[in-house]
Image (cartoon, rainbow, N blue to C red):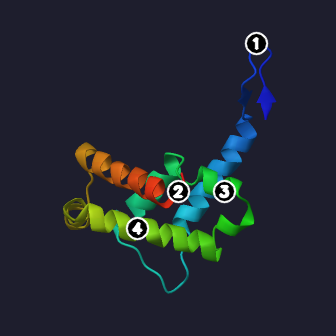
Amino acid sequence: MVTRKDSSVACESGDAKQLRRQEAFLLAMYQTPEQTRTLSQECVTLIAASRGYFDKLLEEGQMYKAGSAKGQETVEGLIRYVEDRAKDVVADIDESLEMSLEDLVVIENAIKAYFAQTGLE
């Protein structure tokens, strides 16, 4: 962390932010060899990673890293939650292989609701 001279607010260094974002994408994309995901499921996990929803989890340490039981449990829970809350959008993405801006908003709102509900935000 870097503290700015003109403020008492601590700012994260670019390197630390990049490393956490890398770990977020690794968590989002991690799958065991027998797992497969649909396009909509990949969209959910990658949106969550790119928007910083996994950041707080990764600050907790090793228990949420890619390949960990807690990490996999969280990602799978997120996917199930979004699929349940946005059934039509998920089905449309998997059928058309496209995602509209409206679909993105619906998915991101469901992701935000998941993390708020679980207290993992």
Between disc 4 and disc 2, the foreground one is 2
Instruction: Decide which of 82, 41 is in the foreground and name it.
Output: 82
- Image location of residue 8, percent across then percent down: 76, 21
In this view, 6 is above or below 76: above
| Amino acid on which disc 3 is placed | Leu
Residue position for label 2 = 119
Crowd around label 1: few <14 · some 14–19 · many ≥20 (10 Å): few
Query: Which residue carries the number 1 mark?
Result: 6
Q: How far is mark 4 from mark 1, CA to CA?
A: 42 Å
Q: Could you tell me which secondary element the residue under label 2 belongs to?
A: loop
Residue under label 4: 79
Report if residue 104 is visible in the image. yes
Query: Mark 4 vs mark 3: which is more N-terminal?
Result: 3
Where 48 falls versus 78 (above or below)? above
Q: From mark 1 to mark 2, how far is it between C-alphas?
A: 33 Å
- Is residue 72 placed above or below 59 in the rendered structure? below
Q: Give the residue drawn at x 53%, y 68%.
A: 74
- Residue at the disc numbered 3: 58
Mark 4 vs mark 1: which is more N-terminal? Answer: 1
